[in-house]
Image: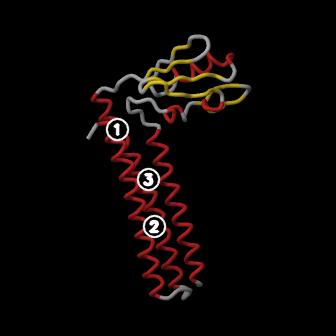
Amino acid sequence: MEFNDLKGLFGVVKTRMDVSIERVRKDLANVRTGRASVGMLDGIHVEAYGSKMPLNQVAVLSIPEPALMVAQPFDPSLLAVIEKAIRTSDLSLNPQSDGKVIRIPIPSLTEERRKELSRHVHKQAEEGRNGVRQVRRDANDRLKKLLKEHTISEDDERKGLEQVQKMTDDHVKMIDELQAKKDQELLGK
């Protein structure tokens, strides 16, 4: 196997690990911290024009205050549908419409709810770390198979295993940092 082929393997490994990081980043963005964030509404879909559409495609979302979001529909006839979609989501939000825009106050979180959300954050982060470790296992198996097929030398395999482990450590560290940042937002620790 040429060194370029190993570079290709490392490129695939890095890409797959980056996907795990992005999944964790997106999952954690959806965790409510008592502060308004338009990312909280990413999972909300609205029945509009005969299909389910993401909320951010039918309304302009803004944050005029730290504990308030505003959704201004492109089409005013969707006000009631948008309000209902937000109300029935699992975010425990109580939107209020004034006929032009929908105000979405973000209630402060109780200490118990903060701890519950922190446990959820830890679970999401662990799933991300497990995803990265699975990529490492796949890459290590591939390197061992290449050695067995005499496509790479033992030195190449050893260097490859070290490179994959370094990428794994870097990606796990990034997930740990995302988790710590979210815990800081939730618990102030």
Q: Position of residue 107 (x, y in %)?
A: 39, 22
Q: Position of residue 166 (x, y in %)?
A: 40, 69
Q: Earlier in the sequence, mark 1 or mark 2?
A: 2
Please identify the quarter of the rendering in which residue 98 is found. Answer: top right
Q: Position of residue 147 (x, y in %)?
A: 50, 84
> 72 above or below 189?
above
Which label sits in the foreground, 1 or 3?
A: 1
Q: Secondary structure at mark 1?
A: helix
Q: Earlier in the sequence, mark 1 or mark 3?
A: 3
Amino acid type for the residue under numbered disc 3 = Gly
Q: Position of residue 5 (x, y in %)?
A: 59, 78
C-alpha separation, residue under disc 1 versus residue under disc 2: 30 Å
Q: Are marks 1 and 3 in contact (CB under 8 Å)?
A: no
- Which residue position is annotated with label 1? 185
C-alpha separation, residue under disc 1 versus residue under disc 3: 19 Å
Residue 6 in the figure: left or right of residue 118:
right
- Which residue position is annotated with label 2? 136
Of all residues shown, which one is farthest toward the top? 98
- Which residue position is annotated with label 3? 128
